[in-house]
Amino acid sequence: MTELVKMGGFPLTQYINFRINPLAWLYNTHKQGDIVGINPNHPKPSFVVYAPEAIKEILTTKDSFFEKGDSSKVFSKTLGNGLLTSEGTEHQRQRKMIQPAFHKKRIASYGDSVSVFTQDLISTWKTGESRLINQDMMNLTLRIIVKTLFGTDVHKESSSITKAVNDIIEKSAQSLFLPFPFLDLVPTRKNQRNKKGIAVLEGLVKQLIQEATNQSDEDEDHLLQMLLQSKYEDGTSLSQQEIRDQVVTFVIAGHETTANVLSWIWFLLSQNPSVEKKFHEEIDTVLNGENPTFGDVSQLPYTHQIFQEALRLYPAAWIILRQAKEDVQITGHTFPKGSSFLISPYVVHRIPLYFDQPESFLPERFSKERSSSIPNYAYFPFGAGSRGCIGSQFAMMETILVMATIGQHYKLKLSQPVEDIVPEPLLSLRIKGGIQMKVEERKR
């Protein structure tokens, strides 16, 4: 049985400490026990879960006992009732409908757009210049997700759309842990930016649906066409609102997370020359100067390990929230209906019991020889179970092709103090304030 302990101190004090520095609070809390009760005497108590066996039960074997609950209500204000926020049978129906867009053959067909758009990006780079790499990655991944899933190239509008998404994310992250939801109604600058951001996305959705409607079935084969053509069992089509909710969900969730992971990867490579050298040697050997394609992804195992290790240290989903729909027993402990559970991949991935030298960037830990030593559910950057990330294979393919395309031509060197690079836990884990890097052309 896992250890269940009660946290000391006043719940309000703990809440304030969490809001000040969520990652530090979660990391320090893990030292108290496997499952830590924040306010166990409350009618709807909250617990922080660190034990892999408990995480497995919550996310997988007993996931039918849980829902996203309050977190879905916050996100639904922007996303509507899309895949990220829907619950129960509705979520199952949506996932089944969307899953074909992420089958292996479809993902393979997306590879060309990833490589071409990445080449477009670096064609604007000049050796020696300093660039805001996180913004470059945001614009790139937005362009990729909109083209591959919705059939439209938004290259010219990418900066305005990524700004809108950023404003929405900042507001949603703030609202997620607000004790007083009515503050959303106060006309603050952040609330006003959020409102404008939503308007930008609404305009994008209308544009995408209009362009997809004008395409013939032979012109394009993507997620939006699938949604427009899908029928319920009674023969009725999806409503415009249902289509809108899915488009907004994938525009926001489908590019921001991957952009953040790529930004962390470039930072980590800049700080670990030996890893960067092995990365360059692999892509030079495999690609031999050619532009990478989907077929090359499986031939780049060390690049894949870099991706996995970056996700260990800086998982996009830094926190996973669940609420019990009914009384439930987890690893021998009984929790009442309404209990809330916080699970932090960021912290679990750094627990020394599961990872040797947990603060070090060591891609080799994910080699075939060593990865089997990682306990199940000690590493889960894409979540798990019925709500695991539907686009995990897409994200892996996209990240590796972007890395290979850029890595063939450029090295990126940090051009700001390393002390300034700190994680900012919003909806996903970004670099606070962004990351400035100097572009240096590689000489092979």
Image: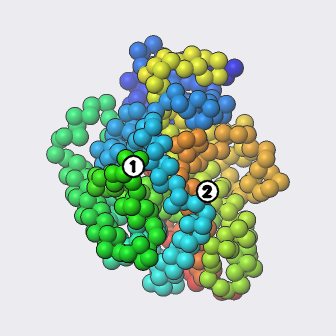
- Residue 427 vertical placement versus 200 (above, below): above
The nearer-to-camera label among 2 and 1 is 1
**Is 178 left, or right, of 218 in this rendering?**
left
Q: Residue at x 50, y 49 (%)?
A: 96
Q: Position of residue 251 (x, y in %)?
A: 39, 60
Q: Nearer the viewer, residue 137 or 142?
A: 142
Q: Nearer the viewer, residue 12 or 341?
A: 341
Q: Quadrant of residue 1?
A: top right
Q: Position of residue 260 (x, y in %)?
A: 49, 59
Q: Residue at x 65, y 44 (%)?
A: 379
Colour treatment of the image? rainbow
Q: Residue at x 57, y 16 (%)?
A: 334
Q: Position of residue 70 (x, y in %)?
A: 37, 33
- Determine the residue located farthest toward the left in the rendered image: 187
Q: Find disc 1 in the rendering and name its residue.
A: 232
Badge 2 element = helix
What's the residue type where badge 2 is placed? Ala
Q: Find disc 2 in the rendering and name its residue.
A: 310
What's the residue type where badge 1 is placed? Tyr
- Determine the residue located farthest toward the right in the rendered image: 369
Q: Nearer the viewer, residue 220 or 276?
A: 220
